[in-house]
Amino acid sequence: MNMDSAGQDINLNSPNKGLLSDFMTDVPVDPGVTARTPAVEGLTEAEEEELRAELAKVEEEIVTLRQVLAAKERHCGELKRRLGLSTLGGLKQNLSRSWHDVQVSNAYVRTSEKLGEWNEKVTQSDLYKKTQETLSQAGQKTSAALSTMGSAISRKLGDMRNSATFKSFEDRVGTIKSKVVGGRENGSASLPSPTGGGDQPLPGPAPF
């Protein structure tokens, strides 16, 4: 019976269809309640209010610090301009400072230590030692082979110089050289003097 009367109240064709909407319109609504998110589980309302107040304070401090930092940067730029410091110099200084910050950072230090440990492990491993010994032995064998080859070539050249064929070739070259030099000397001695013979008079001028 009650369900039928409730259905009549919300029925659109019922003469009482406006009663529910009018009742909901008269109920006051708190905007703060609608905008507030539900409290985190495990926090009381007082704790939530305290955290919200602290959050607002921190955000306000962040805004203030940003404004102060911007003012300091403008003042720093003005000082650099008056001192004649170039932008490139400031960029180099910033890069150097950034690299220094990276070097002293925990991540860089841990990475350097880890690389040092890996390098020590690699150099102390049996495979690395065997490879180094093999390369050293190969280098020694190569040096010994080159030295032996050089000695063999020198000895072969010495044997060639002491051979009869090489000595005969040297004698022939020396004989040809002597003949060429002697022929040049004899040829230069038989050439006439540019001033003519001492006993022969110079010809006189031709008659007109």
Image: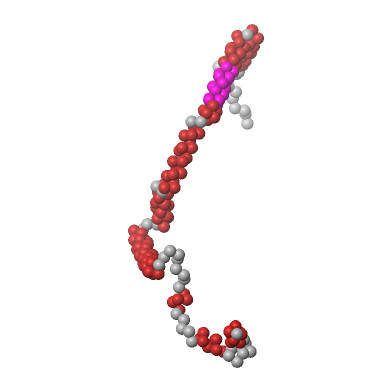
- The relative height of residue 51 versus residue 24 in the rendered view (above or below) is above
Q: Main secondary structure of the magenta part?
A: helix
**Residue 170 occupies quadrant:** top right
Front-lying residue, 135 or 54: 54
Please provide percent x and percent y for residue 128: 53, 30
The x and y percentages for residue 82 are 34, 61
Q: Quadrant of the N terminus?
A: bottom right
For the view shown, which residue lies furthest in the right direction?
Answer: 165
Q: Quadrant of residue 204?
A: top right
Q: Residue at x 48, y 84 (%)?
A: 27
Q: Nearer the viewer, residue 60 or 194?
A: 60
Q: Measured from the top left, where is residue 29 in percent x and y?
A: 46, 81
- Please state the horizontal and vertical placement of residue 164, each as a whole percent of the image: 64, 7
Tell me: 36 left or right of 9. left
Whether the magenta-drawn stretch holds residue 146 is answered as: yes
Q: Magenta span covers which residues?
A: 132-149
Query: In the rendered view, would you say 130 is above or below 105?
Result: above
Q: Is residue 120 inside the magenta stretch?
A: no
Residue depicted at x 35% and y 63% = 72
Compared to 25, does 61 lie above or below?
above
Q: Quadrant of the C terminus?
A: top right
Q: Residue furthest bottom?
A: 15
| Residue 170 visible in the current orientation | no
Residue at x-position 45% and y-position 73%: 36
Q: Quadrant of residue 162?
A: top right
Instruction: Say which of 51 and 59 sits in front.
Output: 51
* Residue 34 visible, this orientation: yes
Toward the viewer: 181 or 62? 62
Q: How many marks?
A: 0
Left or right of 140: which side holds 64?
Answer: left
